[in-house]
Amino acid sequence: MTKKTNKTLKEKADFSNHANHHIIRSLNKSKRKAILTNASITSTFILMILPICALFTIIYYGYGWKESRGNEFLQTVADTVAITEPNLLVDVNDITHEIDLFSMTGTFNLYKQIGSDHKLAHTNNYRLWLNQIDQPKRMLGNGSYFVHPSQSLGISQKNSVNRKLQKLPEGTVSEIFISFDSMYNEKEIKDLFSEFDMELIWFAVNIKEEIDNHHKLIGYPAKIGDINSSFNRKKDNQEQLTEVLEFLSQHEKWINEMTNDLNIKKAIDYIEQNGVEIYGVAATGPTKEFLKISELKEVRDYGLGDVELWNWE
């Protein structure tokens, strides 16, 4: 093979390599351009769809003003706390909420009264994903505060609570949960404790519904003009209990998710047929005053809640 032939072959190879390099560079350039184009289209789509989704979310939770889904969600949580948690209050002026894409989160500061003062007990967040409540960490209405008259008492707490009350100093106020031997009406209970230096806070109401041998807890604030907006000075709290239950029955799915399947409609039916039957009360006052209640034959048992330094007036 001559030198000229070798040179020709080398030139052809160089030309082929150069052509291949040019093709590869062109392909890479086209690929980068395609990627940039796709990224640009995707970004544009996202920038277009996000405002539409945000607008949909705002309309979804805000349409209807006072009767909007968002307001009814916040009211449902506040009312559920009011009827299922003895001595826990939601200050409706203290509720905050945040709307994200397809969701709404309500933040509720829950207060309890110990003596004359209200203190922050804890803060609960409830998130609504479209129309589904995310399971809250703390279920409402699950506390064993009272012993129903139909339940076996087992070991009475009276003696152990009395020992604690005796050891606590004079300068303290306490929270106590009193269970009765039978059903009473509101007037009978107020008359029973009229001579005691204490304040009644919350009445436990019989609805004759059990789960795992425990009675579902429903009640209402004893105080007139409670800071819960649904229990105000416009009507008697017993009347407002029925109205609150009627409102909550419209949101049974939410209630079930928050309270472990509390049957609001059955509760309404029972109260309508039998009236308001009270079997327990939450109260607060000077610690030593509660030593006297063990003498009452109507008091079947009681449990001690929180204790604070003296603030009684």
Image (tube, rainbow, N blue to C red):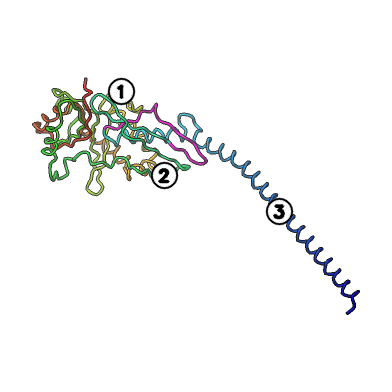
Q: Is residue 8 above or below residue 85?
A: below
Q: What residue did someone put label 2 on?
A: 134
Residue 225, numbered label? 1
Please, is residue 225 above or below residue 63 in the view?
A: above
Label 3 – label 2 distance at C-alpha:
43 Å
Residue 256 image position (x, y, % from top left): 35, 44
Choose between 194 and 93: the one closer to the eye: 93
Q: Secondary structure at mark 1?
A: loop
* Vertical placement of residue 269 versus 114, above or below: below
Name the residue at the top extreme. Answer: 313
Identify the mark at residue 54; answer none if there is no mark.
none
SS at mark 3? Answer: helix
Q: Is residue 18 part of the magenta span, yes or no?
A: no
Q: Is residue 156 left or right of residue 29?
A: left
Quadrant containing the N terminus in the rendered view: bottom right
**Callout 2: few (<14), some (14-19), or many (20+) C-alpha neighbours within 10 Å?**
some
Q: In the rendered structure, which segment of residues is drawn in magenta?
A: 87-105
- State the residue at coordinates (83%, 69%): 13
